[in-house]
Amino acid sequence: MRPFRLPDAHLPSAANGWTCRACFTPWPCAEAAEHLSPSPCSCGQTTYWEKRGPRNWHPGKRCYTPEQGVAARVADAAKGLAPRYPPSHFYPPKPARVRRQSPPIPKHWPTGPGDIRPGTWTWIKPGGLHPGWGDIHHLAMVTAVGDWCDVWLVLDGTVHQVRADRMLLDPPRTERPRWWNWTVADHLAHRADRGPAQACASVQLGLFEAPAPV
């Protein structure tokens, strides 16, 4: 079954001349193209918009200056809007974050409202991470549950803490019940309403401990 969204593995690598990260061919590759809608930029370059998400890309050189990018962010802030960047994704530098290999947790599919636990895959909503990671959705695995969840980011293996109300469930590929549209915070509130909340201590350290030397 084809993926619903553009797989993060097939995002472009601008550092390698706008090639696919997985296919190593000019981007968009065949896998990415079916999830994108081309659109011309005022500079004449073809841009690409994600069909089922907010992301967009402007391959090649930027058609604006860094000063214009800053001005766009200031204008949005003055209007009270969430950060929106020019098509080339003019993001501020990323702060240092720990990078880890994928944690060895079995994938958990929630079986009902409130069933959120380590191993649950979520989409972090735009604005859930530092702006250096972009104003886009990011796929992540939950490794500890709470008002602020510990997550492992698929895109680059970095570890973050994200507010529960900034995360949505990763939808299954079949018909989904209404509670699949809830945020993780909604699930935790539902669980709290049904009884005392079960504390879930962070399991990051245990998951990512270095193996004992042989």
Image (spheres, grey):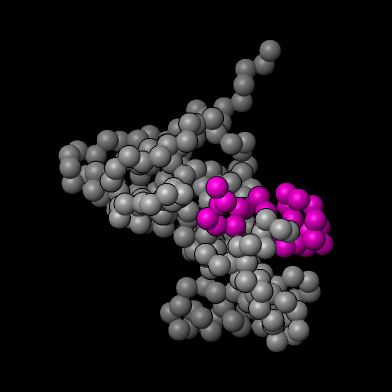
Residue 119 seen from this side: yes
Task: Using the rendered view, name the quadrant where residue 114 is placed.
Answer: top left
- Seen in the image, is 130 located left or right of residue 182? right
Q: Position of residue 171 (x, y in %)?
A: 43, 51
Q: Position of residue 104 (x, y in %)?
A: 54, 30
Magenta part of the chain: 1-28
**Compared with residue 81, is residue 186 higher up or lower down, i.e. above or below?**
above
Which residue is the extreme one toward the front?
Answer: 1
**At 22% across and 44% down in the image, what residue appears?**
192
Q: Looking at this view, is 62 or 57 the one in front?
A: 57
Q: Position of residue 149 (x, y in %)?
A: 42, 46
Residue 144 seen from this side: no
Q: Looking at this view, is 164 or 130 the one in front?
A: 164
Task: Name the dominant secondary structure of the magenta segment.
Answer: loop
**At 29% across and 42% down in the image, what residue appears?**
112
- Seen in the image, is 177 located left or right of residue 126? left
* Residue 5, magenta (yes or no): yes
